[in-house]
Amino acid sequence: MPKVKIKINDVEYEVEQGLSVLDAAESVGIEIPHFCAHKYLKPAGLCRMCLVEIKGARKLQTSCTTPVKEGMEVYTESDAVVKARKEILELHLANHPLDCPECDQAGDCLLQKYYDKYGLYERRFDIERTHFEKDVILSDNLILDRERCILCQRCVRFSEEILGEKLLAVFERGSRSYIATYNDEKISTLYSGNFAEICPVGAITDRRFRFKIRNWFLIKKESICPLCERGCNIYVETPKDRPYLKNYERLQRISSRDNPEINKSFICDRGRYDLFSLEENRIFKGIYEMEEVGWQKIKKILKEHLFTIETVILSSWMTNEEIDLALSLFKDYLNLKNIYFWGNPAGDEDEILIKKDKNPNSYYLEHKKVKRLNSKSKVDFKGSTLIFGDFFRENEFVMKKIEDESFVILISPYIPSFPEKINLLIPSANFFEKEGSYTNFEGRVQKVERIFENDKVKTEYEILEMIESILRKK
Amino acid sequence: MRGFLYFFETIKGLLITAKHLIVNSFFHTLNYIFRIKTKRKGSVTYQYPEEKKPLYPRDRTLHKMMFRDDGKPRCVGCMLCVTACPSDCIYVKAEEVDGEKIATTFIVNVNRCAFCGYCVEACPEDAIRMDSGKLDFVGYSTNEMVLNLLKRN
Ligand code: SF4
Ligand code: SF4
Ligand code: SF4
Ligand code: SF4
Ligand code: FES
């Protein structure tokens, strides 16, 4: 990209050509207040919040729609700009309700943030505020408060530009304008959660997060979504560690994390809402022949059965590191022939984000030449079988093939779906409790942090290390 | 020299005590025995717990929740008190009740409370107050000092 030289607040910077003044300023770390501009949407110039002074121009210019030019001189905090910002904010707030105490956006709200900095504080209008409906159900996940809307049309543009469907529009004119769906139909898209996230104020909010907790109590931890091959970047939001906040559930919200190469700043509703199911049906105790066992006992039982292992089924929810360790043990050290992997069955796909394979790490296993288990695979479960992950329900044929005399060891974070067939269950950490890296469908390796601590269970890596210590000692 | 000062100060202290004793007994005798009303009352011991010292209106005492006419708590679960509290005493959970945000759990852990009154200051709904007049709350275990403010009694 060719560069141009511009001056912002009397300091010279080199920025990419073709950027808007707003993006150029942001690329050098100068924030210009804005509502309607969004990194991944086309500029619209609707909210007028981004006004800046440009030397030579007669009036203040909207920085989101003005491209940078060589030698441009921009002032973002001059008296005229600050005055204009105050007045624009005054107009935006003329009909805005004082809902902040119970508004789910408070804390993340751009209106709040800028008012804090550029507010006029004294109300100069003596007219009655216009009132709108405050709880319009937009879909199963979304609720719209028309009074809080600042008509930035990010939602409208998101549906048109990113989803390619016209789902929402502005109706009426002037101060009576409001956002609505056509014919008041409910929004049905797999990307609905993004509307709540893209709205700069608390107009569209998430019904599943409604009133749960204030967002300044949450810490965002970086992770990726494991529900399809794409590996969208997400934040897992969990309450801060304060003594009394322990009473809140540890998983409060999933939100998107910006990654221009993978998911931009959007994620699908599966990642946003279905990830909560990873927290359910957990098991924290080992089970041996229908009885609870502790870690000491598990180790003893493993010692008896590990040396007769004939089949290993890996899971495509294991991290790269876990797969490497497992392969070095079972393939290189024990020379087993029957190593397969399994996972959730393939599903739908679309052009936006959703990919066919519904597991995070199938690519890496295929890259390592592990065969995918399917009904045609020639497996017989004779000696001991070591299985990672519980995907019996999705692969029913495995159930029929398991012979009664074979010893099945299952390593899974969840209550087993067919407990009668499992001889030993080793409880493992779920996706949020382990760290490592995953490889997405295009071979991109992404690191995942451990989000929650849980000392009742071990991660698959720790269990593999335990197995290694048993195998190599003999 | 220092020893001399010590005795001097001791005698001064004794004189102050004696002055208070005599002045208080004088007014007390006037008020209660001769029944002569004077502006100044002699200070005497309160017979606690039968008799309680009057509280001033701005004294901070045990928290109480305010309720609306329809019986719902005034608290909208904004958690500003939780945010303001320096000792992490308050635990609030809100839910949607008839389209409104209403607190469904409101717990104050008095064990931790510093009686600073910040929670009262922070509340935009005047839902939590510290004017219940209760100062003599006791319990056999710390669990008894964790109060559910939504329980009306
Ligand atoms: S949208 Fe922002 S300013 Fe408006 S009520 Fe919500 S938090 Fe407050
Ligand atoms: S609902 Fe939100 S995103 Fe849509 S126009 Fe209103 S403020 Fe903007
Ligand atoms: S009085 Fe102070 S310490 Fe006690 S609950 Fe209120 S804010 Fe917390
Ligand atoms: S008591 Fe007041 S400050 Fe605390 S959550 Fe309720 S409304 Fe908010
Ligand atoms: S951000 Fe430029 S006009 Fe809204």
Image (cartoon, coloured by chain):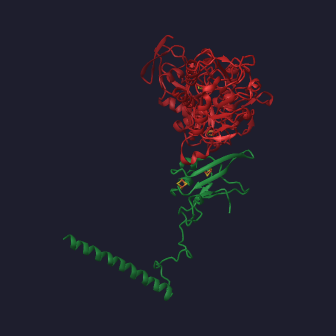
Instruction: Say which quarter of the image contains residue A409.
Output: top right
- In the image, residue B87 sits, relative to residue A472, either above or below, namely below
**In the rendered view, does A49 fall on the left or right side of A130?**
left
Can residue A317 be seen in the rendering of this structure? no
- In the image, residue A406 sits, relative to residue A122, either above or below, namely above
Q: Nearer the viewer, residue A249 or A144?
A: A249
Residue A159 image offset from top left, x and y in percent: 70, 23
Residue B24 image offset from top left, x and y in percent: 43, 80
Residue B56 image offset from top left, x and y in percent: 53, 67
- Seen as rendered, the residue at the extreme top is A2
Tally the numbered discs. Answer: 0
Quarter of the render that holds ligand 5: top right
Residue A331 image offset from top left, x and y in percent: 58, 18
**In the rendered view, does A41 fall on the left or right side of A19?**
right
Q: Nearer the viewer, residue A98 or A268?
A: A268
Chain B: its colour in the image is: green
Chain A: its colour in the image is: red
